[in-house]
């Protein structure tokens, strides 16, 4: 007999708080994120914080599926929307400024990126990927005014709470700097999503679980967790270290979910990498299988998100 799902925030038998669940509850519709490339740079690449960027970061600034920065933003958006329409006709949208650091630039440039989307009826929210050391006060004030029209999501890359890992991957900021920004953001109407990577060099499963537990207890709204994608041409590709197997990854994610409070939305538990440049692990290309294995493991262990949340 099928086990009854004990997790309260679910309509599809998932045992964790999915992004889809949140969007359906909030907007009563399918909502699709449309990745965009607004042509920002990154202070960890241009010499302000570092040169060359985080050691795992691809030439595309971790925005493999965002458009070309040479293309007008609305054209990128319409192209992305057309693709989504095939999959989910009539879906509402979230323009997602994905590539590089999308608050690293003059206020006028940030304004010019958001303005085309603020009055579009099908746009329910706007998401900006950025770094914790790149949110200056004028920018925050502007984003708070935008939040009166649309939900604004700030996606902060962190990857790990451990400063020794941050140094090793050339992250260019500390956990304390990140935490200070989260606390500042939590006093605003902006929504906060934090990115973590499992499988970074020199990290143990216990460290990854501790990162999830600690971040999950900050005043944030959502997290994205994914496996490290080892990409050709990155500094990390020159290192020698073991990549997690799918079984190890699934086990770690289930244990992470157990210590994340049930209210935190999991925007992702897998990532998208460009297959042409992916060195490994190859199993991440089969996202549905990975997600199914996570679901199966949670049922087999009779566990759910927040079960061990202290
Ligand atoms: S902060 Fe983001 S864009 Fe900049 S180097 Fe790191 S991963 Fe790449």
Image (cartoon, grey):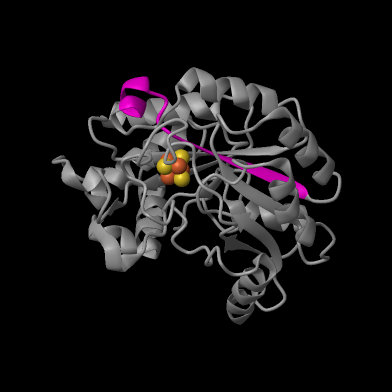
Residue 76 falls left or right of residue 121: left
In-front residue for pair 265/153: 153
Residue 6 falls left or right of residue 252: right
Identify the image quadrant of the N terminus.
bottom left
Please tell me whether residue 262 belongs to the stretch shown in magenta: no
Q: Relative to 189, does residue 278 appear above or below in the rendering?
A: below
At a point 56% along the width and 56% down the height, the residue shown is 39
* Percent position of residue 198, x then y: 34, 40
Residue at the left extreme? 240
Please tell me whether residue 165 belongs to the stretch shown in magenta: yes
Q: Relative to 34, does residue 214 appear above or below in the rendering?
A: above
* Number of numbered callouts drawn: 0
In-front residue for pair 190/60: 60
* Percent position of residue 95, x then y: 66, 59
* Percent position of residue 99, x then y: 51, 53
| Quarter of the image where ligand 1 sits | top left
* Percent position of residue 211, x then y: 42, 28
Residue 244 in view here:
no
Residue at the front extreme? 47
Question: Where on the picture, by quarter, is residue 50?
Answer: top left
At a point 58% along the width and 33% down the height, the residue shown is 134
Residue 69 in view here:
yes
Residue 151 falls left or right of residue 18: right
Stretch of the chain drawn in magenta: 151-167
At a point 70% along the width and 53% down the height, the residue shown is 126
Question: Where on the picture, by quarter, is residue 254?
Answer: top left
């Amino acid at each position: 007999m099928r086990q009854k799902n004990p997790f309260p925030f679910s309509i599809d038998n998932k045992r964790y708080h999915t992004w889809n669940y949140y969007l359906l509850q909030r907007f009563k519709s399918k909502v699709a994120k449309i990745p965009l490339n607004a042509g920002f740079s990154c202070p960890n690449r241009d010499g302000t914080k570092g040169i060359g960027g985080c050691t795992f970061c691809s030439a595309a600034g971790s925005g493999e599926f965002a458009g070309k920065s040479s293309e007008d933003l609305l054209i990128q958006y319409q192209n992305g929307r057309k693709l989504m329409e095939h999959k989910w006709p009539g879906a509402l949208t979230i323009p997602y400024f994905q590539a590089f650091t999308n608050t690293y630039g003059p206020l006028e440039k940030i304004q010019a990126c958001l303005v085309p989307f603020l009055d579009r009826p099908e746009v329910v929210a706007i998401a900006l990927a950025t770094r914790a050391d790149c949110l200056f006060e004028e920018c925050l004030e502007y984003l708070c005014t935008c939040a009166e029209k649309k939900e604004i999501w700030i996606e902060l890359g962190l990857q790990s709470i451990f400063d020794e890992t941050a140094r090793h991957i050339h992250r260019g900021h500390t956990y304390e700097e990140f935490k200070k920004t989260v606390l500042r953001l939590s006093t605003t109407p902006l929504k906060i999503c934090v990115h973590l990577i499992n499988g970074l060099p020199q990290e143990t499963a216990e460290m990854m679980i501790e990162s999830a537990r600690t971040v999950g207890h900050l005043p944030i709204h959502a997290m994205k967790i994914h496996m490290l994608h080892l990409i050709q041409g990155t500094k990390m590709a020159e290192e020698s270290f073991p990549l997690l197997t799918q079984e190890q990854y699934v086990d770690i994610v289930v244990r992470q979910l157990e210590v994340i409070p049930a209210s935190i939305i999991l925007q992702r538990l897998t990532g998208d990498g460009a297959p042409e440049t992916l060195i490994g692990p190859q199993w991440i290309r089969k996202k549905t299988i990975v997600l199914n294995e996570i679901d199966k493991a949670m049922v087999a262990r009779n566990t759910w998100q927040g079960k061990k949340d202290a």
